[in-house]
Amino acid sequence: MVAAQEVMAELSLVIRQIGVKMNLYQCQIKPISPFATKLKGDTIFGQICWAIAYKYGKDELENLLNNYENRPFLIVSDGFAPGFLPKPKAPSYILGEDMLTKKQNRDKIWLDIASLQSAKFSHAKSNDEANYKIVANATIKNSINYLSNTTGDGFSPYALMEFNIPITQIYFLLDINQFSAKKLAQTLEFVSQMGYGKKSSIGKGRFEIIQELSPVLEPFITNSSSFMTLSPCVIEGDYDECYYEPFTRFGKHGAQLAVKNPFKNPILMADTAALITPKISELNSIKSKGYIGKAVANISSTQPNAYSQGYAIIISVAKEIG
């Protein structure tokens, strides 16, 4: 048993050093009810894990997570405007933007892949121009005491934020040797029916898959030495340059795990669209993997083997401003 564990540890180290080729897929979804949770990659990944446990069994999920720290089976992006990716979150002078039009620059947040990879940041479009407008609404609710069927001792209304989301594109970096594309497609269909995120039990987060899971044909990794992330991640290692906005994930358990202590430990991450330039010594390794970051363990007292997706899919970005 000890010898077998040593062999697995050595194998994990080798895998981490040389990387494992993963396949990039995409799909498009059409929300058919309001969402109470935004489409962030780490949250989508957690929802997929729940769906795997429900559809294929707890043992299947545990097998996939056993080596997640060294060899992730799946990395999920945020939801994006179809045909576009976000503009890197870097200072205007890095992006070659006019410093006198900062307000307009902030509204221009979407780039097509060709413009992003050729550093033509001046081609960025607004939500209206990309036909991707998320409408947020606050719905007023009130807690009910179901023993008395009243509001209890006092009237304590609260606001539930809901988002009306248009058709959205999501990317998946998948190790098909661990989890097949067919199983992922079936799992996504399962998530569409059970609902995504908060308040899914009352109908929130329902969607239709209008473009089925398919391979991404555009090359995300090119000869450039700079990259942009497609979801929040935990950046580790040493980089020549790194620009990002901080993002703190205050995670919560759902379903039966929410009965005891639903709160996970907070995680400080680099938000989506971080712009990084790795050291030359790390460049080939990062290119071969197609992602950066790490798995985040020890996040829950309720579920000791729970993980958070601290990885992010990357896309090459030209260093010179186009």
Image: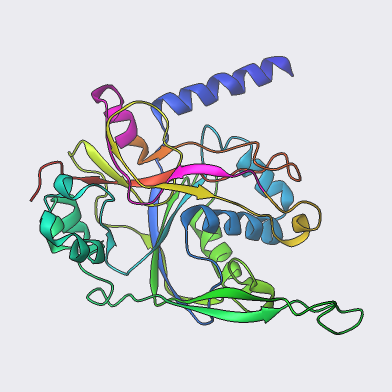
Q: Viewed as shown, does residue 303 lie left or right of 191? A: right
Q: Is residue 209 left or right of residue 296?
A: left
Percent of width and height locating residue 234: 46, 39
Q: Residue at x 49, y 36 (%)?
A: 294
| Residue 191 vertical placement versus 292 (above, below) | below
| Image location (x, y in percent) of residue 166 | 40, 77
Query: Magenta includes 269?
Result: yes
- The correct choice, above or below, for 134 with respect to 226 in the image is below
291 relative position to 65: left or right: left
Left or right: 99 as drawn, with respect to 54: left
> Which residue is painted at 27% across and 64% down in the image?
84
The residue at the far bottom in this view is 149
Magenta residues, start to end = 264-287
Looking at the image, which is closer to me, 77 or 127? 127
Above or below, comparing residue 247 to residue 242 in the picture? below
Q: Quick one: 305 or 236, which is closer to the camera?
A: 236
Query: Is residue 205 in view?
Result: no
**Considering depth in this image, is 148 or 21 the residue closer to the camera?**
148
